[in-house]
Amino acid sequence: MVATLLRTPASWFAELDRLQRDIDRGFGGLGLPVSIRAVGGASFPAINIGTTAQAVEVYAFAPGIDPAQLEVTVDHNLLSIAGKRALPEPAKGQTRYAEERYSGSFRRVISLPDDVDASKIDARYTDGVLRVSIARREAVQPRRIAVQ
């Protein structure tokens, strides 16, 4: 009891953080946010989002998926990436002791900036990476003005 009272406030927060991780793990990684900064590690597929002056680039890391099982849609500036990944069934008599690869249906929804042109989208799946490029509208792209 005395040892608990002598802990610093920092250790209390560390204990709360550990408790939160245990609760998240107990619910089986339901894809709920574990902080305000990012989605939990159980989210599939993992994504990177970046921008250039001409486009918004989204990379979804989804190895082992048949491209025909992927569905990419845009509605009201929300990019949705959905699909299904099936893992092979274990061979007869085989016992699995660990299974860390995600299997089943998935959906990731990404909010896009207001200046994208939803009619100019290119999606390509190569080497397990889905690359979605959404062009920005011409009116908002930087342009060079000739000085006379």
Image (spheres, grey):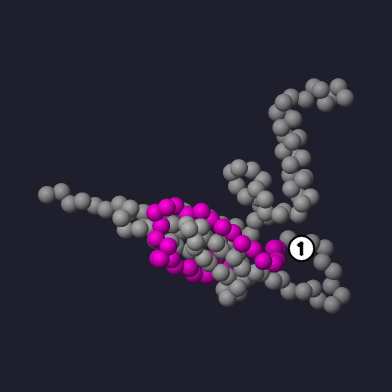
Quadrant of residue 19 within the rendered picture: top right
Q: Position of residue 70 (x, y in %)?
A: 58, 70
Q: Position of residue 28 (x, y in %)?
A: 76, 54
Task: Name the one closer to the observer, 7 or 70.
Answer: 70
Q: Is residue 37 left or right of residue 137?
A: right
Residue underneath mark 1: 99
Q: Would you place residue 113 above or below residue 75 in this image?
A: above
Q: Is residue 110 on the magenta stretch? A: yes
Asked whether residue 85 appears in the rendered view, the answer is: yes
- Taking the spot 83% from the left edge, 26% from the top edge, the residue there is 4
Task: Name the one closer to the observer, 28 or 92.
Answer: 28
**Magenta region's main secondary structure?**
strand
- Taking the spot 82% from the left edge, 66% from the top edge, the residue there is 96
Amino acid type at mark 1: Glu
Asked whether residue 52 appears in the rendered view, the answer is: no
Kind of element beneath mark 1: loop
Q: Is residue 112 on the magenta stretch? A: yes
Position of the N terminus by quadrant: top right
Quadrant of residue 98 within the rendered picture: bottom right
The span picked out in magenta is 101-130
Q: How many marks?
A: 1
Task: Name the one closer to the observer, 86 or 100.
Answer: 86
Q: Residues within 10 Å of mark 1 (few under 14, many from 20)?
A: few
Q: Looking at the image, which residue sits at the far bottom?
A: 92
Q: Is residue 141 left or right of residue 62?
A: left
Q: Would you place residue 89 above or below residue 113 in this image?
A: below
- Taking the spot 17% from the left edge, 52% from the top edge, the residue there is 146
Q: Position of residue 53 (x, y in %)?
A: 36, 54
Q: Is residue 116 left or right of residue 29?
A: left
